Each structure stands twice: as structure tokens, then as C-alpha cells.
Amino acid sequence: MHKLLLATTIASLSTAATASVETKDWHEFASKDAQKYVADNIVLDFYASPSGTGFTKDSEVANYIDLAHERGITGASVTLGAPHTPNLVAFKSEYGKWTKASSSAKTPIRYVKTVDDFQKAHDNGEYAIMWASQTTMPLEGDAANVAVMAEYGVKTMQLTYNETELTGSGVISMINGDTSGLTDFGKEVLDEMVEHGITVDLSHTSHYTTQGITNYMQKHHKGVPVIYSHSPIASTYGCEPHETLSETEKRMAKKNLKKGDPDFRLAACYRLLSDEQAKTVADMGGVIAVTATEWMMDGVWPEDITPKQFAKMIDGAVKVAGIDHVGIATDDMMTTAKVVPFTIANPDKYADNGYMVNAFNKGSTGCAELSKHIAGVVDSLWAMGYSNADLAKLFGGNLLRVYEETWK
């Protein structure tokens, strides 16, 4: 088990061969057929590794991309906008840092402008990078800046990142009792996103706001699908996604559970989705891409997630939303050694009663690096009865369909 106290030491050992060292490497345990399947097909990732937190040296990003490409990963949706980009200037700075870092890889990079770029990258031996934002803070309260984000190549965007923004409330605001939903400004932003071909992403957004978004989209932009770019399904694990902190505390007291008990929880599994949320997006033609990030799953995996556990997560989502509406996303931070200090230093961004830090302390420090898991996931899904055609949908096909319908 990885202990939090070892995180800094572990991170300092990163090399080209190991990339994000907290993640156990399962690749060599996978079958050759599974490894070949990954190499022969489009496989897309999603990760969130901000400069200064996910990486501090360009070589860290280069090594990560080179290993992913070597093992058949086609490309990834890469987060530019997050809490570290509270305005447009900061966003542009992050764009420059990530472009510089990614272009330092030995692997040729194709920066995604059209959906065809994913196939071209696969065919040409390149690594595809598409830009994403997990916040609307760079808009600075002006919906017209959506056009600027589009000019910089942002292809998907969340209206909130955990907390309440001008557009609506996030999941951490929700567990702290914020019942507000989609705002009038949020509606303006949605209109601009549709106009400029940016896919609407609901991850991290409170169920009050997601309901407002899906209702608004179905009324004013009928036929335009939306996605959850990195959100597992709560029912797979029998956890409560929408409880407030006080409700969780009362539930623990009612069950006479205290800290130290295996089933004790500091908070709800607030980043996970209810079946209703997932089914609504599926009915709209969208996709729920499940993430294997361990610290979102407090108490479920005290150690590194295995490919089999990742596959079970995918299967749980398919049982709720259907094979045509599920994707994958690691939400890998590359290293958690820098995430923990950031979390502690920004309690307003992670006001979750210590849930996330507690998960780290339990040992959930692995990042689920896709290049180390995906071949094993293939073997596990095959064992569950999934076909190659099913995997093609799950690993990228479903998301590409949505992108075709939403990008302009």
C-alpha cells in the first residue's frame, strides 16, 4: 500500500520507463492479444495534470506521452482549465505550458481540431491531444469569451469545478448545502458553447445544476448530446452521491459507525452519479465516461486499482446507461505527490470534510495511468463477455460520435 508520507519520495523516482510511478504497471500481465487490440484500435484517455501540480518539468509530460503512445493509446482529452486558471490570462498561460511540455515528447503530436484528427493520429503514429476545461472561470463572467476558448482549441467544458461558479453549483458546494442550480449566465454559456462547437460536460456539477442543464438543453438545443467526461456510477458501489455532509454524519450516527470502522464515511461519494443522472444523458444520446481515480472512491479501493476493478466499473455503467453511452477516462494526475499539498493548501476548493485527503491517507495514491491498465482491462472485459465491437465503442467510438454531433 502506498502511504501518503512516501508520496514525495516516490514521485522523485519518475523515469521514462515508469511515468507516473504511483500506478502499478499491469501491462506485462496482460495477454499479447489484448496488447495488440489496444495497438490496433482507437483508445482515448482523459486526464487532469495541471502545471505545477500534475507536472513541474516538460520531461514528465514527454515521458508520460511517449509511454502511452508506445503501448497503443491514441490520445487524450487534456485539462487546461481548472482551479489554477481563475481567469483568461491564467488559462492562456496554462495553454502555453501544456503545449510546450507536450510538444517536447519524442512522439509526434497532433493537436485535435476535428474528429478526424483522432483517426489520423492513429494511422500516422501520432498522439492526439484535445483540450478541455473543467471550469468556466476563464470566461471572467463574459459568455462572449466562450469564443476565445474555442479559438484556443477547447473542445469540452464543464460549467463548474466542484464549487459554485457564476454558471451554477458544483458537487462540493452541493454536499455543503448549496441547492442552487443553473443560472441565467449558465444558460448564456450553454448557448455559446453550442454555437461554437464545444461539447457540454457535466462532470463535477451538482445534480441540481445538471438537471437544469439537461432540461435547458432538451428544450433549447434539442438533439444536442452532453457528456460526463469522468464520472463513475454510484450504484455500482452502493454509495450515496447526493448527500450533504450533515446527512452523511446523521447516517453514520444512525448506523453507529465511527472513524476507523470499514464502512465509515466522511462524506458521500459526491463525484459519482445517480442512475437517474446517467440515464438522462444516455437518453439524450450522450456518454458517461467512467474514471478510475482511486481517491474518488473512498473506502472501496484502499490500494491501487486493478484492471479488473476498472473493468467492473465500466460494466456497472453499461448496465445502467447501455453499451452505446459509456466511455473511459482515468482523470490521471500523473503524480499525487503534488496533488495532496495543493488540496491541503486550497481547502475552499476541496471542502469535503477531509474525504479526499483521507482517501490518500488510506493508500489511494495510484493514478490509474491508462498505458499501465488498458491491456488488462481488455482481458477483463473479454472475460465478462464483451466483444471487440463493444470495446471499440467504450474506448473511444461513443465519444467520437458525440463529438461529431457537437463540434463545428
Image (cartoon, grey):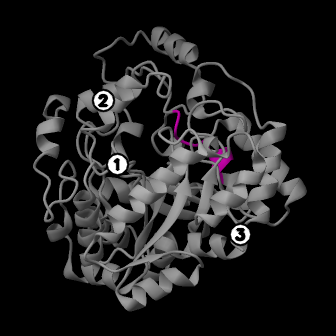
Which label number is shown at residue 406?
Answer: 3
Q: Amino acid at mark 1?
A: Met
User: Disc 1 to disc 3, how far (Cα)?
Assistant: 27 Å
Q: Which residue is mark 2?
A: 341
- What is the crowding at mark 3: few (fewer than 14 residues within 10 Å), some, or many (at least 20)? many
Specify few, some or many for label 1: CA neighbours under 10 Å numbering under 14, 14-19, or 20 or more: many
Query: Compared with residue 39, is residue 12 higher up or lower down, i.e. above or below?
Result: above
Q: Nearer the viewer, residue 219 or 77?
A: 77
Q: Which residue is mark 1?
A: 333
For label 3, the SS is helix
Bounds of the magenta segment? 270-278
Residue 365 x, y percent position in the rendering:
25, 40
Sequence order check: which comes first, mark 2 or mark 3?
2
Residue depicted at x 35% and y 66%:
102
**Which image quadrant: the C terminus?**
bottom right
Does the stretch in magenta take in 303? no
Figure quadrant of residue 242? top right
**Which quadrant, please, contains the N terminus?**
top left
Residue that protrudes farthest toward the right in the picture: 219
Q: Residue furthest bottom?
A: 123
Please identify the quarter of the rendering in which residue 108 is found: bottom left
